[in-house]
């Protein structure tokens, strides 16, 4: 519980910082923070996605409400599962930034993606936006897959109950043959699975035990 509260507070602080920087036309500072997080992901995993990202900060309470009310949302349709969409989104984002500079106008590309995350999380399961739409997530997965540290499963303790799978918003953990496995490329390092695992089989550590 303490970890969840700590993460919620961290996300609210970063969401407030993001909005402040956008409203004061200093989004460059946020992009520097994002760039630093890409490098840090090589060592610590996709901490940005789980703890800093303002889109995830907006999505998390929506996910919580849907879970509490036991409301179902849609899985990713086939056309959305193309790996190309996040890169098209990234290209459009860069284009809006370049155009904004040339035309000396503010195009709120970052806010538009924030709004998209909100809308998608009302209709689709959270992993749909995280894994098939988000351009930031696509970049984070490039470096996050090499994470030296991250959430890993202790195979000796895992009973294959599947609870971790249920609580992962990023579809980063799967249970096959009664054994859970976490994929660093998709993992947001959010710690949900660790908190929920009844066998204490998940911990944040180096690749090998
Ligand atoms: S919740 Fe824990 S015990 Fe259950 S499948 Fe996941 S890692 Fe294994
Ligand atoms: S695998 Fe665990 S730490 Fe990683 S995103 Fe899923 S719930 Fe969070």
Image (cartoon, rainbow, N blue to C red):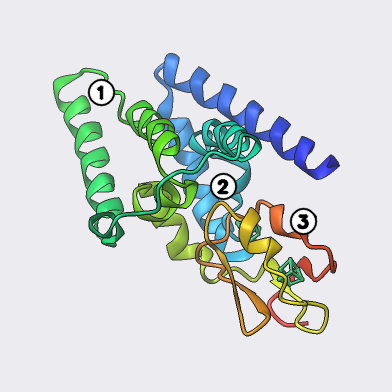
Residue 173 lies, in percent from the top left, at 59, 67
Give the secondary structure at mark 3: helix
Give the secondary structure at mark 1: loop
Give the secondary structure at mark 2: helix
Q: Is mark 1 within 8 Å of ligand 2?
A: no
Quarter containing the N terminus: top right
Q: Is residue 154 above or below residue 39?
A: below
Q: Which residue is mark 3?
A: 196
The one of 121 and 49 positioned closer to us in this rendering: 121
Q: Which residue is mark 1?
A: 107
Q: What residue lies at 80% left-to-right and 71% top-to-bottom?
A: 201
Q: CA distance from mark 3 to mark 2?
A: 21 Å
Q: Is mark 3 within 8 Å of ligand 1?
A: yes
Q: Which residue is mark 2?
A: 48
Q: Is residue 91 above or below residue 175?
A: above
Of circles 3 and 2, the one toward us is: 3
The one of 5 and 13 positioned closer to us in this rendering: 5
């Amino acid at each position: 519980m303490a970890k969840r509260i700590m993460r919620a507070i961290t996300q609210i602080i970063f969401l407030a910082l993001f909005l402040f920087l956008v409203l004061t036309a200093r989004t460059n500072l946020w992009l520097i923070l994002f760039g630093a997080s890409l490098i840090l992901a090589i060592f610590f995993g996709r901490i940005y996605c789980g703890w800093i990202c303002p889109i995830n900060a907006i999505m998390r309470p929506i996910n919580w409400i849907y879970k509490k009310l036991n409301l179902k949302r849609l899985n990713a349709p086939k056309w959305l599962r193309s790996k190309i969409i996040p890169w098209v989104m990234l290209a459009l984002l860069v284009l809006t930034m370049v155009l904004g500079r040339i035309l000396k106008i503010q195009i709120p590309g970052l806010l538009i993606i924030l709004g998209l995350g909100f809308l998608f999380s009302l209709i689709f399961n959270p992993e749909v936006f995280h894994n098939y739409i988000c351009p930031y997530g696509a970049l984070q997965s490039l470096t996050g897959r090499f994470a030296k540290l991250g959430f890993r499963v202790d195979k000796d303790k895992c009973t294959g109950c599947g609870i971790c799978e249920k609580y992962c918003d990023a579809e980063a953990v799967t249970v096959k043959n009664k054994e859970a496995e976490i994929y660093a490329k998709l993992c947001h390092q959010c710690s949900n699975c660790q908190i929920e695992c009844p066998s204490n089989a998940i911990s944040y550590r180096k690749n090998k035990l």
